[in-house]
Amino acid sequence: MPNVRRVDVLGFYCPVPVHEARKALKEMRDAEILEVVSDDPETLHDIPALVARLNITLESVTENAGEFTFRIKNSVG
């Protein structure tokens, strides 16, 4: 089971969610999972763009009562 790290950026707006996600990803090992929880609608565009730039895997995006959870695998494939 991969290690899961969670970054809670509720209440923060661009560019904080992307900055915090990028910082966490740099500290993680390959194949670890990052969950980013945000309530900024801009993250629906910004986080997938970050993942594409880094060439890693966005496993899922879920929404619950205005909170978005991005599950990112820190490796390709």
Image (spheres, rainbow, N blue to C red):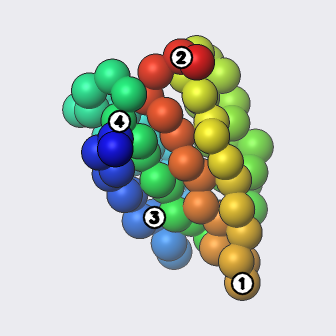
Left or right position of 28 against 72: left
Does residue 9 lie above or below 43 as drawn? below
Earlier sequence position, callout 1 versus callout 4: 4
Of the two numbered discs 2 and 1 in the rendering, the one whose residue sits closer to the viewer: 2
Q: CA distance from mark 1 to mark 4?
A: 27 Å
Q: Position of residue 37 (x, y in %)?
A: 52, 63
Q: Secondary structure at mark 2?
A: loop
Q: Secondary structure at mark 4?
A: loop
Of the two numbered discs 3 and 4 in the rendering, the one whose residue sits closer to the viewer: 4
Badges 3 and 1: C-beta atoms under 8 Å apart? Answer: no
- Badge 3 crowding class, 10 Å Cα cut-off, few under 14, some 14 to 19, many 20 or more, is some
Q: Residue at x 63, y 40 (%)?
A: 59
Does residue 69 lie above or below 57 as drawn? below
Earlier sequence position, callout 3 versus callout 4: 3
Question: Which residue is tagged 2?
Answer: 76
Q: Position of residue 45 (x, y in %)?
A: 76, 43
Left or right position of 39 against 26: right
Q: Quadrant of residue 3?
A: top left
Earlier sequence position, callout 3 versus callout 1: 3
- Badge 1 crowding class, 10 Å Cα cut-off, few under 14, some 14 to 19, many 20 or more, is few
Q: CA distance from mark 2 to mark 1?
A: 30 Å
Question: Which residue is tagged 3?
Answer: 9
Badges 2 and 3: C-beta atoms under 8 Å apart? Answer: no
What type is the residue that disc 1 sits on? Ala
Q: Secondary structure at mark 1?
A: loop
Q: Position of residue 1 (x, y in %)?
A: 34, 44
Question: Which residue is tagged 1?
Answer: 65
Residue 32 numbered mark, or none? 4
Residue 51 numbered mark, or none? none
Q: Position of residue 2 (x, y in %)?
A: 34, 41
Can residue 71 be seen in this snapshot? yes
Of the two numbered discs 2 and 3 in the rendering, the one whose residue sits closer to the viewer: 2
